[in-house]
Image: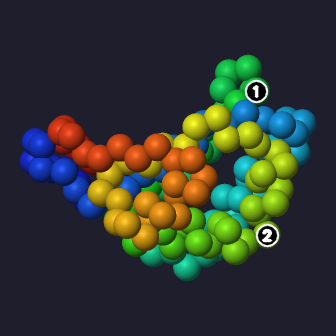
Amino acid sequence: MSKSEPNSGSSVVTYIFELGLRGDLETCIKFINDSVIHTHGCNEPKTIKFEWYLSADETSATLFEMFEDSDGAKLRGENLLASPLIGPFQELFEIKSFTVLGPVKKDLNDLVTQFGAGIRKYSGGFYRL
C-alpha cells in the first residue's frame, strides 16, 4: 500500500474510538501499554496499525486501528471480545464515539453496530505512504 489513484478507494477499514478515561491516569497508561503488547502478539495478519493517543490534558484518548480489509477488522473485533482485555477496557474507558471507515461487509457491520459504531463509506480522496 504505497499510494492510490485519486478517488479509487481501497479495501482498508479503519476504527476510530474516542474515549473518556474513567480510571486514574497511571492505570489507564499501563492498560494502553499492555494492550499494545497483547494485540501485537495476536495472529492478526491484516492489522496494519494499532495506535493510542492521549489528549493534552490526559482526560481522553483516541484509539486508531487500521486493517487491510473488512475481514481483518472483524477478526480484530472478535479477538478483542474473546480476550482478557475487554473487561478492563470497559472499566477504564468510556466510549464517546466509535467510527468505522471503509468498505464494511455485512458480518462486520453486524458486529460493530452492536457497540454503537457509526459507519462511513468511502466518498473520495487518495493516499500516499
For label 1, the crowd category at 10 Å Cα-Cα, with few meaning under 14, some 14 to 19 and many 20 or more, is some
Q: Secondary structure at mark 2?
A: loop
Q: Locate the N terminus by quadrant.
A: bottom left
Residue at mark 1: 59
Q: Residue at x 19, y 51 (%)?
A: 9
- Spot the residue most to the top: 57
For the question of whether residue 53 can be seen, the reply is no
Residue at mark 2: 84
- Labels 2 and 1: the sequence-earlier one: 1
Q: Is residue 47 above or below residue 64?
A: below
Q: Amino acid at mark 2?
A: Pro
Give the Cα separation between the discs numbered 2 and 1: 24 Å
For the residue pair 4 and 9, the one nearer the viewer reads as: 9
Q: Residue at x 21, y 40 (%)?
A: 123
Relative horizontal placement of residue 49, taking residue 101 as reference (left or right): right
For the question of whether residue 66 can be seen, the reply is yes
Q: Position of residue 10 (x, y in %)?
A: 22, 56
For the residue pair 65 and 1, the one nearer the viewer reads as: 65
Q: Position of residue 4 (x, y in %)?
A: 15, 50
Q: Is residue 14 above or below residue 44?
A: above
